[in-house]
Image: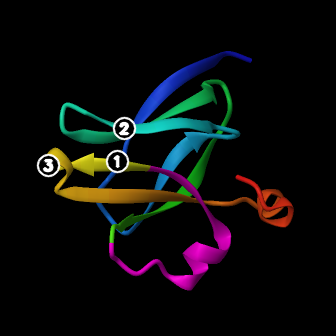
C-alpha cells in the first residue's frame, strides 16, 4: 500500500462526483491560484470509486437529503471572499449508520 496526498479540483456545481481511490480521506479544502481543491490522503494502488459531493453557497438552500446523509467537509472563498461555498460529502453506508464521515 502506497499512501500519498493528492489534490482534486472542486467544480463549481451543486452536485458532483469525483473518482477517488477507495478509502480516500479528505484532509483539507482550500483555494490555490483562484481554483478550489480537495487534498486527500489516498492509496494510489486502490481501485477508484465515485465519491459524491454537494456544494452550497452561503444563504442557499441545503436540500434535506444533503442535511441528512452528507457530512460537512469545509468552507472556501472565491473572489476575495465575495463568494463563500460549503462542501459536503455523501456518507457511505457504514458511516451513515455510525454518524461519522
Q: Is residue 89 magenta?
A: no
Q: Is residue 34 left or right of residue 89?
A: left
Q: Residue at x 78, y 57 (%)?
A: 95
Above or below, 14 relative to 32: below
Q: Is residue 61 magenta?
A: yes
Q: Secondary structure at mark 3?
A: helix
The region drawn magenta spans 59-74
Q: Is residue 15 left or right of residue 77?
A: right
Q: Quadrant of the N terminus?
A: top right
Q: Which residue is mark 1?
A: 76
Crowding near pointer 3: few (<14 within 10 Å), some, many (20+)?
few
Give coordinates of residue 79: x percent, y percent. 14, 49
Q: Which residue is mark 2?
A: 30
Q: Residue at x 68, y 31 (%)?
A: 46
Above or below, 32 relative to 59: above
Give coordinates of residue 59: x percent, y percent. 33, 75
For the residues labelled 1 and 3, the Cα–Cα distance comes to 11 Å
- Locate residue 3: give its quadrant: top right
Q: Which residue is mark 3?
A: 79
Front residue (pair 17, 84): 84
Q: Residue at x 43, y 31 (%)?
A: 7
Q: Are marks 2 and 3 in contact (CB under 8 Å)?
A: no
- Locate residue 20: give its quadrant: top right
Give coordinates of residue 27: x percent, y percent. 56, 34
For the residues labelled 2 and 3, the Cα–Cα distance comes to 13 Å
Amino acid at each position: 500500500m502506497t499512501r500519498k496526498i493528492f489534490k482534486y479540483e472542486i467544480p463549481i456545481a451543486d452536485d458532483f462526483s469525483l473518482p477517488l481511490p477507495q478509502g480516500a480521506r479528505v484532509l483539507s479544502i482550500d483555494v490555490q491560484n483562484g481554483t478550489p481543491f480537495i487534498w486527500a490522503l489516498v492509496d494510489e494502488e486502490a481501485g477508484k470509486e465515485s465519491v459524491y459531493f454537494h456544494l452550497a453557497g452561503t444563504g442557499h438552500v441545503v436540500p434535506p437529503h444533503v442535511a441528512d446523509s452528507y457530512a460537512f467537509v469545509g468552507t472556501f472563498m472565491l473572489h476575495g471572499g465575495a463568494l463563500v461555498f460549503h462542501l459536503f460529502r455523501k456518507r457511505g453506508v457504514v458511516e451513515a449508520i455510525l454518524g461519522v464521515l
